[in-house]
Amino acid sequence: MKRGDSRNRRLLTGGLLTGVAIIALVIPQLVSLAAQEILVLIATFALLALGLNVVVGFAGLLDLGYIAFYATGAYAWGIFSGAGPIKMPYTRSEFWGDWGFWIILFVVLAINMGIGVMLGSPTLRLRGDYLAIVTLGFGEIVRIVANNLESVTGAALGISQIPHPRIPFIGYHFGLNPVPYYYLLLLLLIVGIFVIRRLDHSRIGRAWIAIREDEVAAEAMGVPTLKMKLLAFAIGATTAGVAGVVFASKSNYVSPASFDVFASFLVLCAVVLGGMGSIPGSLAGAFVIVGIPSFLQLRFPELDEYRYWTFGVILVAMMIFRPQGLIPSKRREAELMLEADPDIPEAVT
């Protein structure tokens, strides 16, 4: 590629990103309240897909219990906010003040990172279908525990009246308005994209690629496979936990019904549909999986019963005609091209 072509491509990419950023900032002010709620839902699933993409897309680890980390973040805020059954000094709003939500946000980062490492240490030695089954079991265990531990989680009734966050010093209260939550999730997405992109273009990212392509060969070449897989798992867990805290605060209520295995499959479908290993693909997948059906349901409520049927047809068609996803990463697209036509020179990858 010529230098001028490369420069023009960078300018075009920069212009597109600037346009998308402007639209993302302005659009909540131009739509109805119901549409604002859908935007918050899309942003939440985009954050979830971004974290799962690290695990599935970059490191190649099939995690079917990812929603469990989402649940731990939501319940952490529900319990520490004082809305849960536990009534201790540290679960009272007076104890935390306006800083409560923001402190718990960082506490959940540490909690979920620890849970991710504890779960990953024994299970990440497994591969393929075995790892998928174990993570699926972990997700169901978390949901069942939340459904039965009445003294902590409120059991099937869940935790209600979870307080909304306040911004310290200025005392701004989020309340029921979805717009502040949208901008908060947008900020978290920007931070997550920056961190994950930097990791992807580092030695850690190259180690994840090596593990995804051939773990045995990567280990033989000196890549600390278990350490790198644990790191990917921990990043995915912390991202989901942060999304869970925002979800619990926004919905004002949390219950086990929100964290069933179907929610895990939805996030996984967003990653696969958008393009595994692609950061823009995660965002596009979340919009297609959650946003389009929600907007269609808002506009055509009578078609709601056909939503998942149509959704299944779209997924099957994507796997047949565009297996690399909507916005694939260059690396993943080249790999699929090489698999389809081995005569393509390896230099294209």
Image (tube, rainbow, N blue to C red):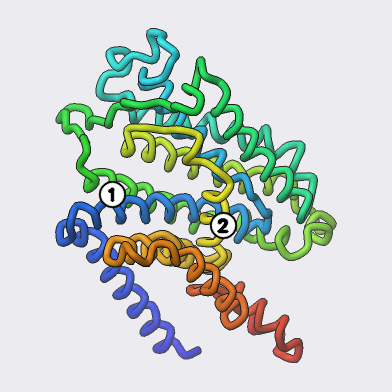
Amino acid carrying label 1: it is: Tyr
The C terminus, quarter of image: bottom right
Give how far apart the Cα atoms at labels 2 and 1 are.
Answer: 22 Å
Q: Which numbered disc, 2 or 1, marks the residue closer to the eye? A: 2
Residue 159, relative to residue 177: is it above or below?
above
**Residue 148 horizontal/vertical position (percent):** 57, 24
- Foreground of the two, 47 or 19: 47
Q: State the image quarter where residue 215 is shown.
A: bottom right
Looking at the rendered structure, the number of numbered marks drawn on it comes to 2
Q: Amino acid at mark 2?
A: Leu
* Rendered position, 155 above or below 95: below
What residue is at 15 percent from the left and 61 percent from the top? 30
Of residues 2 and 124, the one drawn nearer to the viewer in this rendering: 124
Measuring from the top left, give residue 104's x and y in whole percent. 40, 27
Q: Is residue 217 left or right of residue 88?
A: right
Q: How dense is the environment of label 1, judged by Cα within 10 Å: few (below 14), some, or many (20 and up)?
A: many
Identify the image quadrant of residue 136.
top right
Residue 269 visible in image: yes
Residue at position x 83%, y 58% from top?
216
Query: Compared to 79, does 172 lie above or below?
Result: below
Point 20% across, 42% down: residue: 177
Could you tell whether 234 is left or right of 345 in the image?
A: left
Residue at the spot x=79%, y=45% of the render?
125
x, y percent for residue 28 = 20, 57
Is residue 201 visible in this depiction of the protein?
no
The front one of 313 and 264 is 313
The residue carrying mark 1 is 182
Residue designated by label 2: 268
